[in-house]
Amino acid sequence: MYAALVAALVAYTAVAGTGCKAAIQGSGSSFLYPQMEVWVERFREAEPGVVINYNPTGSGTGQNQFLQGVVDFAGSDPPLKRADWERLRGRVVQVPVILGAVAVVYNIPGLRGHLNLSGEVLAGIYLGRVRYWDDPSIRALNPGVELPHREIVAVHRSDSSGTTNVFTLFLHKSAPSLWPEGLVGKSIEWPVDSTGRGVGGKGNQGVAEQVRQNPYSVGYVEYNYAVKTGLSYAWIVNREGVSVPPSRETVLAAAEAALASLPSSPLDDWSGAFQAIVYAPGRESYPIASFSFLILRTHYPDPAKARALSSFLHWLATRGYDYVIEGYAPVPPAIRSMIDEAARIVGGGG
Amino acid sequence: MGQPREDRLFYYSLLPFAGATVAVVLLLAAVLGYYSLPALREYGASVIVGSEWRPSEESPREASYGLLVPLLGTLATAAIAVATAVPVALAMVVATEEVLPPRLRGLLGGVVDVMAAIPTIVYGLWGLEVLAPLLRRHVYPHLNSALGFLPPFSCRAYTGASYLTAGLLLGVIVVPYIYAIVREAYRSIPSKYRLAAYALGATRYEAVRILSGMVRPAVAAAVLLAFGRAAGETVAVALVVGSAFNPPTCLLAPGYTIASLIANQFGESFYYPLMANALYLGGLLLLAIGIIANVAGLRLLAGARSRAGL
């Protein structure tokens, strides 16, 4: 008993004795979490004195805790709402740090090759109007592919989700006449449900499970999840009419194309960022791509914290993208220099 | 009081604990009621009788939260559960009390008792992985083609997740509850009735018919208690009901129950003004269903016991 206590004390002093200069608390996006874990691990090797804790509470909670001053930074898929940004103008820094995508997964037994789908077709499916896999609109996108005359089961999220927001925004932007703005959001009323062919799943896992279990179904999950579960995913027709698969390259291309409509400083209002990257122009661009942000303060009362966060951001901009895990894509160089700018802002404010 | 001092102390020392139980239930109802009020004030009765569930992050005016679909779904799935579980449980009681050789009686009875101890998440996963695909492949197509003229079976079952799947899974879950109540009643029938039946020359089948008639009030009580249990079940149902806003007019379609709606949407509900309040109201409705079913069931049971002379 005493031995254990002594051992614990020794271990504690050993940890405390490594010269811990700053402990940083962050919370937010669970999408960002696996990548953040890798970064935190690698950063600790580069700078052992800084301890960063990141808690995957979900983007909304992360933003909330950041705004209330509970955490030092937030990870969030959506940037701050315009109203929140206005209120904190000049005191808050936002930078996209990683790119993700929404993959459209399907389960069509016996289908060979890949399936091409467009926003119009997907809107039709989730409205309940496109009923069979061999619908003329799907056949037109997939010449030479033998499609079964089977009814389509449309799987969607049953909980509120940023993934649903990006997916429905894509449907609206690519097929505005079919998919009204009222059906864009993190949690919506799915028209297909009333046909009995719509089914919900909780979380990416729930959607993947329903797709796996129901032959002739289609669903949408985060790209990294599609990669992990090994479900087939569709190529999606982009703004230029080219069908592209989700991949590091096509997602990066979408971000490059979106740059022109994005703010040029971390101090700006980023609330329109999703409008810019979803259904972005460019022949190579994957049309259902998204950002994930880090949100920080410009000034931290504790100078050690400011220095630590600044050096993390600088490390991220210069070395972090050597460690991007599968299913995610690095941000383009222009955004990396913005992350470095954010490092200067945060560091200079100490 | 004319009681010895010790007994009085004993009585008073137990009072706080008994009182705490009552207080917890009252407090539960009060909190649910308190948090439901804002939703009732904004939307009026349409929270209960409306069937549209359209959340809005921006303003409560753009949103609508109608609980009718999940409310009907709750009643439908619980009714299916009880309707399927009662015959099974009754057959098991007769089997373990009258028909099976003594060794098998103990075994079967033990297995049913163990069923009650299995966490419902385990039933849920089994329902998702085994029951739902099985029903979708081998049962629902036939049900639809044979009984498609009846509204409850009129739609094609595209997914294994549906009201009927949830109801049948709940049926499996409540079998041990019904079994335990009915078995207890059956065992408490004074042996003179059984002896009398045989003395009059009844066959075993006739004797069982006479005796099972005597436990009818217990069966009714078991039905009500199991209904309350099934209506409140959350996690197993959330996995197999399909989470889609569909009225349970056709049972082969995916749907919602109140408990599964809360499980799905409560986590993020605070980003939507008044959604959490509407979900609290759902909780209050569940509590009401549970209390009505349980009180009615327990009263029936008490009546049955007193008539049996216990």
Image: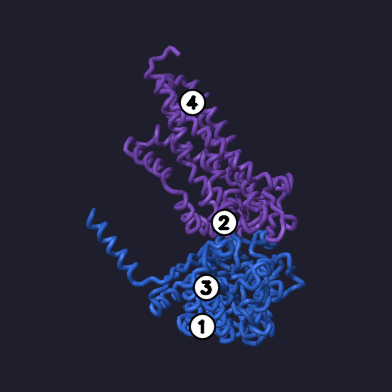
Q: Are marks 3 and 1 on the same chain?
A: yes
Tell me the kind of residue under disc 2: Gly
Report how far apart the C-alphas of labels 2 and 4 lie in the structure.
Answer: 52 Å
Total marks placed: 4
By what rule are the colours in the image chosen? by chain
Q: Residue furthest right?
A: A177
Chain seen in blue: A
Given this view, does label 2 or label 4 mark the residue nearer the observer? 2
Instruction: Indicate the position of residue A290 as horizontal and vertical percent values.
Output: 60, 75
Query: What numbered label is drawn on residue A317?
Result: 1
Query: What numbered label is drawn on residue B210?
Result: 4
Seen in the picture, residue A214 relative to A40 is either above or below; the reply is above
Disc 3: which chain? A
Secondary structure state at the residue bearing disc 2: loop
Mark 2 touches mark 1? (CB < 8 Å): no
Q: Which colour is chain B painted?
A: purple
Query: What numbered label is drawn on residue A226?
Result: 3
Residue at the spot 27% in from the left edge and 63% down from the top edge: A10
Report how far apart the C-alphas of labels 4 and 3 lie in the structure.
Answer: 61 Å
Between residue B25 and residue A154, name the one nearer to us.
B25
- Find disc 2 in the rendering and name its residue: B267
Tell me the kind of residue under disc 3: Ala
Between residue A26 and residue B235, name the one nearer to us.
A26
Disc 4: which chain? B
